[in-house]
Image: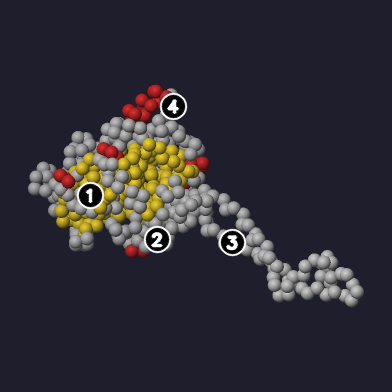
Amino acid sequence: MNSVSLTRRKLIQAMFYGAGAAVITACGGGSSSSGSPVGAPSPTPGTPSEPEPPVPEPPVPPATMLPLEAGPLAGIGELVESDVDGILIPEGFSIRRVARHLEDPISGLPNLTGLLRDNWHIFPDGGAVFPVQEDGGWVYVSNSEIAPGGGVGALRFDRDGTVIDAYRILRNTRRNCAGGATPWGTWLSCEETTDGQVYECHPLGPASLARAHPALGIFNHEAAVADWDTRTLYLSEDDGNGRLYRFRSAGVVTSITGQPGLDLDNGVLEVLEVDGFANGAYQEDLEQARRLHKVRWVPVQDPHRAQETVRAEIEAATGQGAPGTRFKGGEGLWVQTLPEGQRPDIAGSANPLRAVVFLACKGDNRVYALDIDNDQIEVVFDNEQLIGSGEAPFNDVDNIVVGPAGDVVVAEDGDLMRLMVMVPNQPAKILLRIPGGGSELTGPAFTPDGSRLYFSSQRGPSALLLPTGATYELTIPEAFRRA
């Protein structure tokens, strides 16, 4: 499907001026050479007549798609085999393994007890990269999707990419699946349980600084991301009958990093409703879902109770679904904010495109794009587009990340084991593949300069070759880092 140009046409105004003419009166005659009736006032010589009104432009039809653009990774070629665990990557790229469960990430040796230093955790899932200004290095954080246990581990890199420390920033939680980095430098780790909460963590630790924020809702949490300009968080729910939530913060407080951050304990929790799909309705028609629809936000009922229970009670009492459009298995979330001067207009919308929330849903293998400022949503990726590329359909979309150059990368929660580069409204490209199946790809996260992409095989080979998790770093050539 070709992208639709949304550039507005310039107005064309036609101004017509009557020519001034002198009235010539013939001797003894009673007529004008201009043909004007006798006695009509004559225009003053040299003075134009009143201009005709401008010709109105036909109304511009509202846009049916957002003006999204692909990043440079859309230009990658065929995959070739690497020398690391048989992983297939594009030619010219390189890959290394940076950590395995039960391993000391610094020495690379088995560390079964974790007594001297934390070993890498089991079942790594959602992750993010945080720059460290003091030395030019960075931290990669990663959830552990297990219960009991859970928590979040961290790898500290120096400016050359060498691992110099490994530690925990959250302990003793349950099934920490995905989450999201905040603009104020914290990691939001989400529990994927019916009574799950969101925990805010400091990427440089210690774990004792982590805090639960029950005001963000009690449900099967998957991911959480923040838009600073609107003081809003967006949260996904991994449930076949789930919703897309937003939390409108009451204000700004001092965060656990010491930086100003959003108040995550006071605010309003709401669910999204697509026009025409209220009270648990679902957009069955994929062709229609690919077109922009207006949305509204409805307050969550009993936000401090498990939402699965609240929905069941509402349905039993009213005979209809609970508020909110149904999203089948909400997974990864990411907010992409477009730079000043690069925010295109959208025909029929009041605001230019400033920020987009991408939501992946594994129950129908769709990726949605929500235009924050204009309250409208569309499906920008689905399996029909992938099938058109000659590839097998997605085996459950999962974590999602947008790179510094605008690349949208989606991980796969299934045996095909691929990372995909999403090209909005066009066939996707495969960024890498791990042969063998039996796991899922998780935690994709770019360094701020786009030179490295971290990800995990959640049940990849551990230090003892057990299927308990491994984490990798893909190095991206300079030609694929520029927007």
Outermost residue toward the bottom in this view? 27
Q: Name the amino acid, label 2.
A: Glu
Whether 257 is drawn above or below 12: the answer is above
Marks 2/3: CA–CA distance: 25 Å
Query: What residue is disc 1 on?
Result: 255
| Residue that carries the numbered disc 4 in the rendered image | 320
Q: Earlier in the sequence, mark 4 or mark 1?
A: 1
User: What residue would you read off at disc 2?
Assistant: 340
Instruction: Tell whether label 1 touches label 2 (CB within 8 Å).
Output: no
Measure the C-alpha gap from mark 4 to mark 2: 44 Å
The quadrant where residue 212 appears: top left
Dot 3: element: loop
Looking at marks 2 and 1 on the same chain, the residue that comes earlier in the sequence is marked by 1
Q: Is residue 426 something one can see in this rendering?
A: no
Q: Residue furthest right?
A: 28
Q: Residue at x 80, y 66 (%)?
A: 40
Whichever of labels 4 and 3 marks the residue nearer the N terminus, that label is: 3
Q: Residues within 10 Å of mark 1 (few under 14, many from 20)?
A: some
Residue mark closest to the camera, 4 vs 1: 1
